[in-house]
């Protein structure tokens, strides 16, 4: 029998390109969450800036997040541009814990102007925490039923996404989450960027949420930055 898992979603304030300040904000969110797993929005560490340099997992600027995770026993899933093979750049997810960071996932389905700046990832990914299998996604991935199906085929208990949408589009996240929960009978969590960032997002949606497998919203943040909400998966 596995223990319940405390899962949280965060939408910290983000400064463009300022990895140092953003890492401090992520560390504060880790400490505030009191969670075993904490999900952050798409490109939360740099902002949605197409020219942001890839963040190496060994980057010393991640130290505050690593320290906070060590203190709390948290796995933080952080959005950042990451490097790939042959000089390619990806929109990625860094898995950060008390031992350091690693690239856990690279966004597969790119939208808007992203293909001019980033390469797609080559497959779905799962992280396992305390017996819970957690599938990973980034924004447009969640709108592609084949992505959820491919991730679910790896055997998952939850589908976790970092996202960025305009404030007027926040309902899209709910539509996608409900579809995934119903199709695969899994928990769904979306950490949704709040505040302003690049790419024309002057007012991002926020409203990060966690849905139970039956479609109930069990945790929901508001539209403004600096909120963290959590739920217990059992």
Image: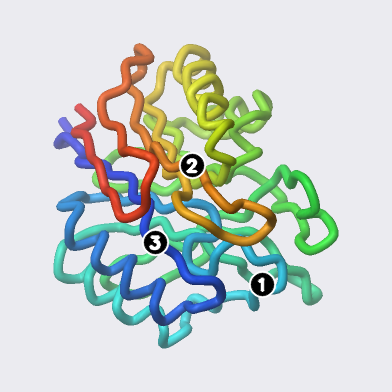
Name the residue that disc number 2 marks: 161
Residue 44 in percent (x, y) is at 48, 61
Label 2 or label 3, whichever comes before in sequence order: 3
Marks 1,2: beta carbons within 8 A:
no
Residue 83 in percent (x, y) is at 66, 72
Q: Residues within 10 Å of mark 2 (few under 14, many from 20)?
A: many
In this view, the residue farthest toward the bottom is 60
Label 1 or label 2, whichever comes before in sequence order: 1
- Measuring 32% from the left and 16% from the top, which residue is drawn there? 216
Residue 146 in percent (x, y) is at 68, 27
Q: Residues within 10 Å of mark 3 (few under 14, many from 20)?
A: many
Q: Is residue 164 left or right of residue 66?
A: right
Name the residue that disc number 3 marks: 13
Which element is circle 3 on? loop
Q: Is residue 182 above or below residue 168?
A: above
Q: Distance of mark 1 from mark 3, alpha carbons?
A: 24 Å
Q: Is residue 197 above or below residue 86?
A: above
Residue 185 in percent (x, y) is at 42, 16
Q: Distance of mark 1 from mark 2, alpha carbons?
A: 20 Å
Viewer-nearest of labels 2 and 3? Answer: 3
- Measuring 57% from the left and 26% from the top, which residue is drawn there? 172
Which element is circle 2 on? strand
Name the residue that disc number 1 marks: 83
- Measuring 44% from the left and 50% from the top, which residue is drawn there? 194
- Measuring 77% from the left and 58% from the top, which residue is drawn there? 119
């Amino acid at each position: 029998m596995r223990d319940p898992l405390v899962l949280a979603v965060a939408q910290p304030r983000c400064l463009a390109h300022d990895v140092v300040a953003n890492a401090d904000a992520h560390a504060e969110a880790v400490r505030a969450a009191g969670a075993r797993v904490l999900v952050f929005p798409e490109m939360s560490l740099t902002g949605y800036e197409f020219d942001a340099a890839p963040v190496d997992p060994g980057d010393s600027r991640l130290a505050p997040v690593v320290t906070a995770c060590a203190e709390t026993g948290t796995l933080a899933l952080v959005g950042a541009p990451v490097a790939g093979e042959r000089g390619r750049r990806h929109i990625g997810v860094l898995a950060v814990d008390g031992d350091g960071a690693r690239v856990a996932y690279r966004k597969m389905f790119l939208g808007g102007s992203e293909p001019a700046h980033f390469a797609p990832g080559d497959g779905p990914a799962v992280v396992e925490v305390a017996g819970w299998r957690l599938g990973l996604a980034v924004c447009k991935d969640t709108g592609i039923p084949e992505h959820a199906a491919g991730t679910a085929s790896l055997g998952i208990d939850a589908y976790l996404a970092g996202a960025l949408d305009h404030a007027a589009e926040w309902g899209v996240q709910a539509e996608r989450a409900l579809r995934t929960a119903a199709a695969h009978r899994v928990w769904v969590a979306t950490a949704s960027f709040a505040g302003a960032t690049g790419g024309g997002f002057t007012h991002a949606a926020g409203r990060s949420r966690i849905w139970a497998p039956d479609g109930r919203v069990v945790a929901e943040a508001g539209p403004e930055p600096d909120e963290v909400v959590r739920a217990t998966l059992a």
